[in-house]
Image (tube, grey):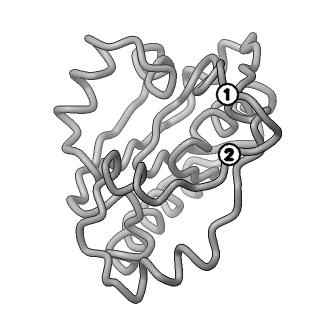
């Protein structure tokens, strides 16, 4: 099983394209199968985390000030190439993997609508998946901090199910 969060939906989807036979299930945590480049016009070698932008764009519900401070201390810049460049996807088998999209920052109904109505790179692969389970876990974009027990239980259940049907 491969679980990814946030922008790693791009690299996770690329991995499912390259080695689908080694992945029993995909789990996207407040993420989705991204295609193309997330920020094609990004310049420089890395993108540091901008806390003001983060607070404006992301749901921070359930995160204490202490957790946010720890987050700020541990955050590392994202290599610009990861955001600027897309990966060519060629293996249609990725579409048949059991995929679960855990929606934490916004309800699944919103994410489904965005996937249909918007051309956002991080959602471009949603409509091509053949086996998708949607789970709502209302909290922040970082459920591993705001609702860790619940997230772990959901991922554990997916892993158990995948192990029962492992290839």
Estimate the spatial distance between the alpha carbons at disc 1 and disc 2, rounded to whole Å.
8 Å
The residue at which mark 2 appears reads as 47
**Viewer-proximal residue, 139 or 12?**
139
**Image height of 25 relative to 141, above or below:** above
Q: Is residue 27 left or right of residue 150?
A: right
| x and y percentages locating residue 135 in the rendered image | 28, 49
Tell whether label 2 touches label 1 (CB within 8 Å).
yes
**Image height of 9 relative to 66, above or below:** above
Q: Is residue 111 left or right of residue 52?
A: left
Which residue is drawn at the image coordinates 47% and 14% (left, top)?
128
| x and y percentages locating residue 25 in the rendered image | 57, 44
**Viewer-proximal residue, 62 or 3?**
62
Instruction: Tell me, for residue 71, which label it has, or none.
Output: none
In the picture, the quarter occupied by the C terminus is: top right
| x and y percentages locating residue 106 in the rendered image | 23, 45
| x and y percentages locating residue 147 in the rendered image | 32, 75
Q: Is residue 3 left or right of residue 43?
A: left
Label 2 SS: strand
**Image height of 160 relative to 72, above or below:** above
Which residue is drawn at the image coordinates 58% and 27% (left, top)?
38
Which residue is drawn at the image coordinates 51% and 20% (left, top)?
121
Q: Earlier in the sequence, mark 1 or mark 2?
A: 1
> Neighbour class for label 2 at 10 Å: few (<14), some, many (≥20)?
some
The quarter of the displayed image where residue 37 is located: top right
Which residue is drawn at the image coordinates 71% and 25% (left, top)?
84
Q: Is residue 112 left or right of residue 46?
A: left
The residue at which mark 1 appears reads as 42
């Amino acid at each position: 099983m491969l679980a990814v969060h946030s922008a790693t939906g791009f690299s996770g989807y690329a991995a499912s394209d390259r080695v689908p036979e080694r992945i029993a299930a995909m789990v996207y945590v407040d993420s989705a199968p991204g295609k193309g480049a997330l920020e094609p016009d990004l310049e420089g070698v890395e993108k540091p985390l901008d806390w003001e932008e983060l607070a404006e764009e992301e749901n921070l519900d359930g995160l204490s000030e202490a957790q946010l401070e720890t987050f700020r201390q541990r955050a590392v810049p994202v290599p610009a190439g990861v955001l600027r460049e897309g990966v060519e996807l060629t293996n249609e088998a990725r579409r048949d993997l059991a995929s679960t999209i855990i929606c934490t920052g916004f309800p699944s109904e919103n994410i489904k609508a965005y996937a249909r109505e918007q051309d956002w790179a991080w959602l471009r692969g949603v409509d091509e998946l053949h086996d998708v389970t949607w789970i709502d876990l209302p909290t922040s974009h970082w459920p591993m901090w705001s609702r860790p027990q619940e997230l772990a239980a959901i991922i554990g259940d997916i892993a158990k199910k995948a192990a029962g049907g492992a290839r």
